[in-house]
Amino acid sequence: MNWPDLSMGGYGFYVWGSYIASLIFIVWEVVSLKQRKKALTQQQQSSKAVSAPVLRGSINETTS
Amino acid sequence: MNLYKYASPATFYPLAGKLIPWFAIPAALLFATGLFVGFFIAPTDFQQGDAYRIIFIHVPAAWMGMFLYVLMAIYAGIGWAFNARLSSMMASSLAITGAMFTAISLITGAFWGKPTWGTWWVWDARMTSTLILLFLYIGFISLQAAIDDARRADRAGAVLALVGVINVPIIYFSVQWWNTLHQGATIRLLQKPTIRGSMLAALLIMLAACWLYSVAVVLIRLRCIILEREQNASRFAEVGV
């Protein structure tokens, strides 16, 4: 095992830049998925309480 | 055991939930191992110095971008041809992860190109065709988002995905067909790879990690899509549409 030189022999900006950019993408994907899941469970709970009045209203508007 | 029953979203949903940790946890462990081997064990390249360490994320991301596109087109095609809902949902789920990996490969490629070629971007055959791949993914995602009826969106997306699949061999063979700035393949199926063992190990571990990660996030997203569509269907059923 050899400890890497953090400056990457002068290429630090490029090496760390690409890993940080990749990390941002992966974190973004995981976080947005978590939010999507959370929004779904919240929606499910609220639709159980009141049976989708918003959608019902909007469909009546378009069909009437 | 009747495997066909898992083609139904309602029975696949709990199975997917059980499978997710089996992919997510090894993915995290392999990412850590791959980065460790790539940064602590693999030696500095005699030509490119440490800049070459970008390939440990660049190459797996580029492979995943291409592979997930083919997989997406297959699922979209099956969903269209056999009217299999779950298959189409799988295609929608794959698109975002595939687009993300393609974007990672383009950005890390630019980070690699600047110090080694002296430029962030050139309209080289491989890079241009990879950019087209990203546009195909974005086109697929936006087309599906633009159509309200889920099954119509699936069919329209399937046409786009299947037509676009021609781009994948173009990307893969672009370095042989045209005189490109991008280098040829280092790892081939039937020949000995031209890189050192520990470098190859880091690359393959990172590839396995990207694979497992993709399966985990695609299954999580698939579960969301199943729920979303079921909710919409039950709401429409409720109001009698």
Image (tube, coloured by chain):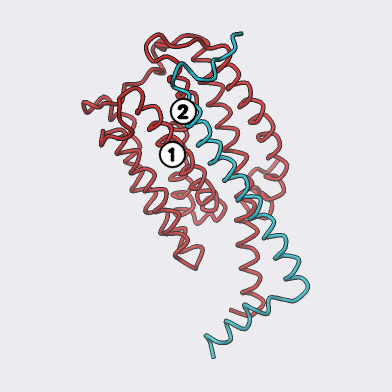
Chain colours: A cyan, B red
Nearer-the-camera pick, B239 or B140: B140
Give the letter of the chain under mark 1.
Answer: B
The residue at the point 66 percent across, 70 percent down is B234
Q: Quadrant of the C terminus of chain B?
A: bottom right
Residue under numbered circle 2: A13
Residue A33 got which mark? none
Total residue callouts: 2
Q: Nearer the viewer, mark 2 or mark 1?
A: 2
Q: Quadrant of residue B29?
A: top right
Secondary element at tag 2? helix
Left or right: B152, with B201 as reference point: left
Looking at the image, residue B227 lies above or below residue B122: below
Q: Position of residue B101 (x, y in %)?
A: 48, 38
Q: Quadrant of the N terminus of chain B?
A: top right
Q: Position of residue A60 (x, y in %)?
A: 58, 86
Type of amino acid at the residue the image marks with label 1: Thr
Q: Position of residue B94 (x, y in %)?
A: 51, 45
